[in-house]
Image (cartoon, grey):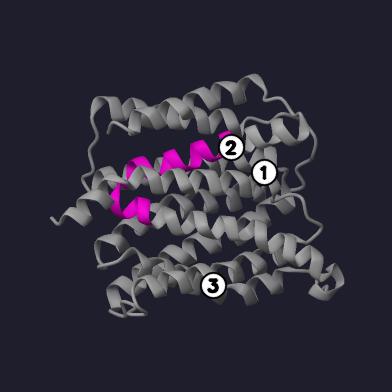
Amino acid sequence: MTKDMTEKRHNWLLYALVTMITWGIWGAFSDQTTLPKTWVYVVWALSMIPCALVALANIKFKLDVRSKPALLSMGVGLLGAGGQLVLFLALDYAPAYLVMPMISVAPIVTVLLSTVFLKERVSKLGIVGIALAFVALVCFALPDNTDGAVSSWIWIIYASMVFIFWGIQAFVMKLANNNTPDAESVFVYMAISAVVLIPVALLMGDGTPVSAYGWGELTKVFFVQILNAIGAFTLVYANRYGKAMIVAPLADACAPVIMCVISLILYAAFPTVPQLIGMVAAISCVLIFSRE
């Protein structure tokens, strides 16, 4: 193994931290828009393109076009973007405080698949770190209000689909990284997948043209959504050099910590007791994984 590869492998946590920070900022501001969810998806998919161009430039535009890596990488993108579209359907029938707790623990699927099929193992301390990550996920998923109503039980089916899609996605991301010489190719195919599903998102909308919302709003949403894209980019690197069973719960558990801190600074919105517990658990698991 070359010195460069060793250093990159050691830096998987750095890539995961970038994902946590960008996703945390993205999450804190993602609801501050009047755009419908379907148009937000379109803007997000388009925001993947600049990151994909950077990825291509990193590999001198030599995209891995072999069938197996391409199909696995497209699968990563379709599972992620498809899950996002199904999430929109779930939120049409039930409030977020019911839907999000179910899908927030999707990394448990990743952990199980990685243990069984990739034979990934961690130390006893690493197991504690994974457990703390799930404690944080559950704490942040607990509702802090009781607003909203369920209009149909079908939300459970949609939420379960998202849970499965996103849990499998992180596992397939690791498989894709194992079958291609660079992480950049994986991300480029993810971006292609997101763009491919734009027509599906538009069909799910009410037909209102994007011009009705103004370029100012679109620009604001783009700069928020590109944080999501950057986080996805660095997540691919984290998965390449780290273990999927660690990266998935860690990234999902720690981003809400950033969201809570931003809310505290900007809106004087103090965390709830479960959120405080989640913050302590998330920070603890980062410290543990820094030694893993």
Q: Which residues are magenta?
A: 237-258
**Residue 125 location in percent, x, y?**
28, 25
Does the stretch in magenta take in 212? no
Dot 3 corresponds to which residue? 49
| Between 152 and 241, the one nearer to me in the picture | 241
| Between 112 and 270, the one nearer to me in the picture | 270
| Between 126 and 220, the one nearer to me in the picture | 220
Judged from the image, the secondary structure of the residue bearing numbered disc 2 is: helix
Q: Is residue 128 placed above or below 23 in the rendered structure? A: above
Dot 1 crowding, Cα within 10 Å, few <14, some 14–19, many 20+: many
Numbered badge on residue 28 = 1
Residue at position x 47%, y 74% from top? 53
Labels 1 & 3 near each other (Cβ < 8 A): no
In the rendered structure, which amino acid carries the disc numbered 3? Ile
Is tag 1's residue or tag 3's residue first in the polypeptide sequence?
Answer: 1
In the rendered structure, which amino acid carries the disc numbered 1? Ala
Is tag 3's residue or tag 2's residue first in the polypeptide sequence?
Answer: 3
Quarter occupied by the N terminus: bottom left
- Tell which residue pokes out farthest to the left in this image: 1
Q: How far is disc 2 from disc 1 in space, using C-alphas?
A: 8 Å
Quarter occupied by the C terminus: top left
Residue at position x 72%, y 45% from top? 94
Q: How far is disc 3 from disc 2 in space, using C-alphas?
A: 25 Å
Does 131 sit left or right of 274 as displayed? left
Labels 3 & 2 near each other (Cβ < 8 A): no
Dot 2 corresponds to which residue? 258
Does the stretch in magenta take in 252? yes
